[in-house]
Image (cartoon, rainbow, N blue to C red):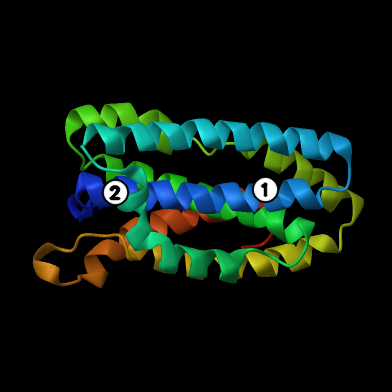
Amino acid sequence: MGLAELTPSPAVYLGFLGYMQLVFFENLGRAVMAAPTPEAKSNLARATRELADAHEVVRAELRRLGLDPGEAMAPYRAALDDYQRRTQGADWDEILITCYLTHGFLADFFAGLAAGLPRALAERIAPVVEVQQGEEILVALLAREIDGNPRLASRLALWGRRLVGDTMLVARSVLAWPNGGTDEARIEPVFSELVGSHTRRMDALGLTA
């Protein structure tokens, strides 16, 4: 079983993705506000603009379906706001690693689900979900922070391990299981692959997953 077999309806997929992007935008906004230098603020602001552009694509697709974007995203607000509160991080470094790791994990996840959408929609949405907006900026900022304070790595590694559990739970919540049931054994390899990509992201910063 692959993610494409568990893709929800286009309305659910786009509504969930759209609100998730708003969570990402809020996280990046917090990173901008907490950034210690004008250069860091400016770089992160570029990432927020990229994400805003991606969000407009999702809103346009919801309107193409004849849906009001706000109403389509509303059912997922409570769960995703709670997820954001649990994973937002206590300081700038934790906010940065949250943006990098959770955005990356969920970009991979939604890209996998996109394969189960109607073909035309999948082709239009792919450029939005296959790219983690601002990834290069986040990696560069995090690498600089870790290089300047090697003891930071252990704290960020611990935070990264916590993030993956919460992020897997929120990802599972959008899956459309056949006949309303679940088959954890069959889906485990898919999530193992996603966790493997998460581990590679941490490895890129010298963090132990």
Residue pictured at 8% horizontal, 67% vertical:
179
Q: Position of residue 34 (x, y in %)?
A: 80, 53
What amino acid type should be assigned to the residue bearing mark 1?
Gly
Q: Which mark, by number, is residue 53? A: none
**What crowding class fits label 2: few (fewer than 14 Cα within 10 Å), some (14-19), or many (20 or more)?**
many
* Dots 2, 1 in contact, CB < 8 A: no
- Above or below, 150 against 204 in this view is below
Residue linked to disc 2: 13
Is 109 displayed left or right of 66 in the figure?
right
**Residue 204 percent across, percent down from the top left:** 66, 46
Q: Residue at x 12, y 63 (%)?
A: 178
- Identify residue for label 1: 29
The local secondary structure at tag 2 comes to helix
**From the viewer's perspective, is 161 left or right of 176?**
right
- Among the 4 quarters of the image, the one containing residue 150: bottom right
Q: Nearer the viewer, residue 103 or 63?
A: 63
Of badges 2 and 1, the one in the foreground is 1
Name above or below for residue 107 compared with residue 94: above
Q: CA distance from mark 2 to mark 1?
A: 24 Å
Badge 1 crowding class, 10 Å Cα cut-off, few under 14, some 14 to 19, many 20 or more, is some
Residue 194 seen anywhere in this rendered image of the structure:
yes
